Amino acid sequence: MKKLISVVMVLLLVLSLVACGNKPVQTTEAPGNQGETQKPAETQTDLPKMTMKMHMNCGTSDYVYTAGEKFAELVSQKTNGKVTVELYPNSALGTSAECIEGLAAGVCNIVFDPIDNYAAWSEIANINPAPYLYSGIEHYRKVWEGEVGRKILDAIGEQSGKILLGAGLQGVRIMTTTKPIKTVEDVKGLKLRVPTSSMYIETWAWLGATPTPISASEAFTAIQQGTCEGQENPYGASVGLSMYECCKYVTETNHVYGTDSFGFDKTYFNNLPAEYQKALREAAEEACKYLTDLAIEQTAEKKQVFVDAGCEIIETDVSQWMAAMDGFFAAKFPYLDEYVKMIQEVDPKK
């Protein structure tokens, strides 16, 4: 009898264990995701906090700096405060060339500067100061906020080992001179201060001027002393250089639409968490569109400084200057021909 009772108890125990093994597992369903089990907290991504140093060669009063602040703000928002971008204006970390070179070594993590500063590593970057590529702001935005601009940035990045994100308008270049320049003929023999870039030097030599490559900081003194008779820069930079004090004429040649971009070392960027890469890309695009808006808005304000100083504003026939550049790229920069054509093909005025 005892043996029978023991067998029955064992059978009951086995049946109990089987029943427990077939019991449905309780799940916690997130709203809007019915049927999906919530991931255990310990498997969720725990991203590290990071600080990125950003080089800028502009000063804190420049609207490019304002766009840099916007970028830092957006990155913080998009990473829930986990990534902090520290701004270093006025080349506090070194020159642009030194900082681009130092990206791989961590001298800085981001460079926010004109893309032609990459010309030492990628000849394609010379497209930035190339003259008379755009029919106006609408054309510029179509290029740099679209597929063509992305292709150019990717090509520069491929040659230089960098990642370039976003493209914003630094400004449209005009001339400030000590004598009136109304036509292309008036520029013949003009001693013009230009940046130390082959594109600027070749452009003004092609037009018949005498280009004098010196640093921007020396331009005011050079014009005062008669070494130069003028310079070319966007309105904003020209005000920053106090050109309204030494140049009484402004000619709106609108010859170059300068572009700034956010540059990263490729290895550094690709090793960042995917979430951070996405946040940086989005922030760069938004900040660069903001920069273009600022450049357009503040050009009128900076122009007024010259007007208030009694300078004469000359609205020259830009089509004559564009015609004077015929054959320039084929003769001097044939390797840019592919990119020049890409830009011209998306001109909405064609």
Image (spheres, rainbow, N blue to C red):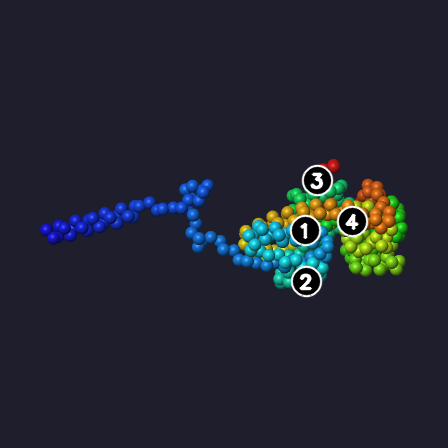
Provide residue 326's location: percent of width, then percent of height: 81, 44
Identity, as a three-letter code, of the amino acid under mark 1: Ala
Q: CA distance from mark 1 to mark 3?
A: 26 Å
Q: Earlier in the sequence, mark 3 or mark 2?
A: 2
Identity, as a three-letter code, of the amino acid under mark 3: Val
Label 2: state its secondary structure. loop
Q: Nearer the viewer, residue 243 or 121?
A: 243
Q: CA distance from mark 3 to mark 4?
A: 30 Å
Provide residue 218's location: percent of width, then percent of height: 81, 60
Identity, as a three-letter code, of the amino acid under mark 4: Lys
Look at 88% across and 46% down and name the residue there: 185
Q: CA distance from mark 1 to mark 2?
A: 19 Å
- The numbered dot on residue 67 is 1
Q: Determine the image quadrant of residue 269.
A: bottom right
157 to the left or right of 215? left
Identity, as a three-letter code, of the amino acid under mark 2: Leu
Look at 75% across and 42% down and name the residue there: 136
Label 1: state its secondary structure. helix
Q: Earlier in the sequence, mark 1 or mark 3?
A: 1
Q: Residues within 10 Å of mark 3 (few under 14, many from 20)?
A: some
Q: Earlier in the sequence, mark 4 or mark 1?
A: 1
Q: CA distance from mark 2 to mark 4?
A: 28 Å
Tell me whether the residue at label 2 lies in contact with that at label 4, contact meaning CB atoms closer than 8 angstroms. Answer: no
- The numbered dot on residue 346 is 3
Label 3: state its secondary structure. loop
Nearest-to-viewer mark from 2 and 4: 4
Provide residue 165's location: percent of width, then percent of height: 64, 50
Q: Earlier in the sequence, mark 2 or mark 4?
A: 2
Q: Which residue is denoted by mark 4 in the rendering?
A: 302
Q: Which residue is denoted by mark 2 in the rendering?
A: 93
